[in-house]
Amino acid sequence: MKRYSGLALLRNALDYNRNWPPAWRSPEPKKSYDAIIVGGGGHGLATAYYLAREHGFGNVAVLEKGWIGGGNTGRNTSIVRSNYLWTEASLLYEKSLKLWEGLSRELNYNVMFSQRGVYNLGHSLQDMRDIERRVNANRLNGIDAEVLGPAEIQKAIPCINTSPGARYPILGASLQRRGGVARHDAVAWGFARAADALGVDIIERCEVTSIEVRAGRAVGVATTRGAIAADRIGVVVAGNAGVLAGMAGLRLPIESHPLQAFVSEPIRPVLDTVVMSGAVHGYISQSDKGELVVGAGIDAYNGYGQRGSFPVIEHAMQAIIELFPAFSRVRMLRMWGGIVDICPDACPIVSKTPVEGLYFNCGWGTGGFKATPGSGWVFAHTLANDRPHDLNAPFSLDRFASGALIDEHGAAAVAH
Amino acid sequence: MLLIECPWCGPRAETEFSYGGEAGIERPADPYALSDAEWADYLFFRSNPRGAHRELWNHAQGCRRWFGVERDTVSYRIEKSYRLGSAGSGRPAAAQIEASEEKRR
């Protein structure tokens, strides 16, 4: 791997930038691997990277049916935070946030992680009680969090409407200053390049069509580019998790829903932080290009079509205009939908399965992006040792039978 | 936006309806006879198919009645909608809901 640096930029500029090597190879799939990761999104690539980096796996492939980062990795609103309510969830997301903080250096790739703070607004007395409870829980877990009143919010975000006469007046907010945003594509590309440098084969346009199970053990997959054998198979395919589970005869407590987002035309810097509101159902930040990035809630119905219904967009836009009346004149440029895997307790499943050698990492629902490095880190540990790390042990598939659910609907808010 | 045909009121905009999830999930007659895994399957596990899906909708801003819809989850095309318990719904749970609605009336 050619290291990226200021010097490399200068040297390549002298060659008119004709000599940059590709960031990763495009190898033909081998007949067998020690481990296969199905799904070349951020989570899958991070898993492959940490398998090679932390656990010494030299013979790993990532199989992606489309192209790297073309699914939910490229379809989210790129918000990163760790202020969840329950200890299990906040420790997992905090692990991820800590990895984010060193990620650009670790990968030698600028993932543009910008810790500009995340505000979660409260609009009612109950909202404020929940916010104070969550902030206290966060602080007990060593996660930075604070409660702000309307005057402090108005001072930090001049264009927000904190007037008491608003239809849903802002009574306060929680603020996690270490939260922020990152560049979604860069995360996928950075992990892909770093994994490739450690010998991981990244195989694009390779769709898994069946999983071969012999005597209760997964032994390989059939793909559109031939059969591939593997000792361990990790599946990280978000919305399509149920389809892959079905190939191995498993059922999941997951339903797939469209989740929509949209961006405006680029405007001058106006919002230097992230604002989310579970009560009015919208969240917003401004990208470095100047576009307002707005996220909606999920469409209620099951769907795999990577698009949703217009009323959901309208609903999110109403929420944003309620919070920021000045944005009513900003034109929206484009919108899109991703398919998210919703779990009954709004928490992921990072787990072994009843099939030996087959592992699932799914159910991140509307909030997977922030977990990208942490999810890969714990999933790599689970695959390498055939047992979960302490951080993801509570997120097993068994919890639905044992009843040890981790109810994060509150902190997950509108979408997270 | 989906155009949904309510079996009683005719085609209406999606915003008039609320979604009730997968159809045909029967409440176990004797929950105490089930293992934890079987109870979990009833409570939480869903078929979540990529393709034809039978689901419940409620005409919340119309007649407020539940009915069944068969819809493709990739194209979102609605193949048919039907009254619960009618010929073609063919699901015991549907009949159950119908019966309980009947009782309430």
Image (cartoon, rainbow, N blue to C red):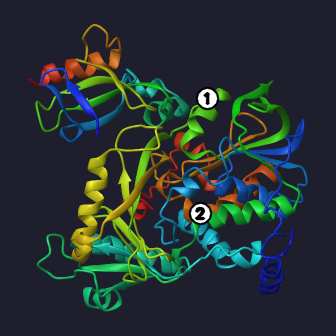
Q: Is residue A409 left or right of residue A7?
A: left
Q: Nearer the viewer, residue A138 or A254?
A: A254
Q: Name the quadrant of the C terminus of chain A.
A: bottom left
Q: Which residue is mark 2?
A: A371
Q: Is residue A391 visible?
A: no
Query: What residue is at 62 percent from the left and 48 percent from the top?
Result: A396
Which of the two labelled residues, at mark 2 and mark 1, occupies the earlier sequence position? 1
Q: Is residue A300 above or below residue B91?
A: below
Amino acid at the residue labelled 2: Ala
Q: Is residue B68 above or below residue A361?
A: above
Query: What residue is at 54 percent from the left and 79 percent from the top?
Result: A143
Q: Is residue A235 left or right of residue B19?
A: right
| x, y percent for residue A139 | 49, 81
Locate residue B55: give its quadrant: top left
Separation of marks 2 and 1 at Cα, in angstroms: 25 Å
| x, y percent for residue A237 | 62, 45
Q: Is residue A269 visible?
A: yes
Query: What residue is at 50 percent from the left and 59 percent from the top?
Result: A76
Judged from this view, the residue extending furthest toward the top is B87
| x, y percent for residue A294 | 38, 65
Q: Nearer the viewer, residue A408 or A405?
A: A408
Instruction: Using a 10 Å C-alpha cutoff, classify the residue at mark 1 as few (fewer than 14 neighbours), some (14 to 19) or many (20 or more).
Output: some
Q: Is residue A164 above or below residue A23?
A: below
| x, y percent for residue A200 | 84, 54
For disc 1, the chain is: A
Q: Nearer the viewer, residue A225 or B63?
A: A225
Q: Is residue A204 left or right of residue B41?
A: right
Residue A246 — which label? 1
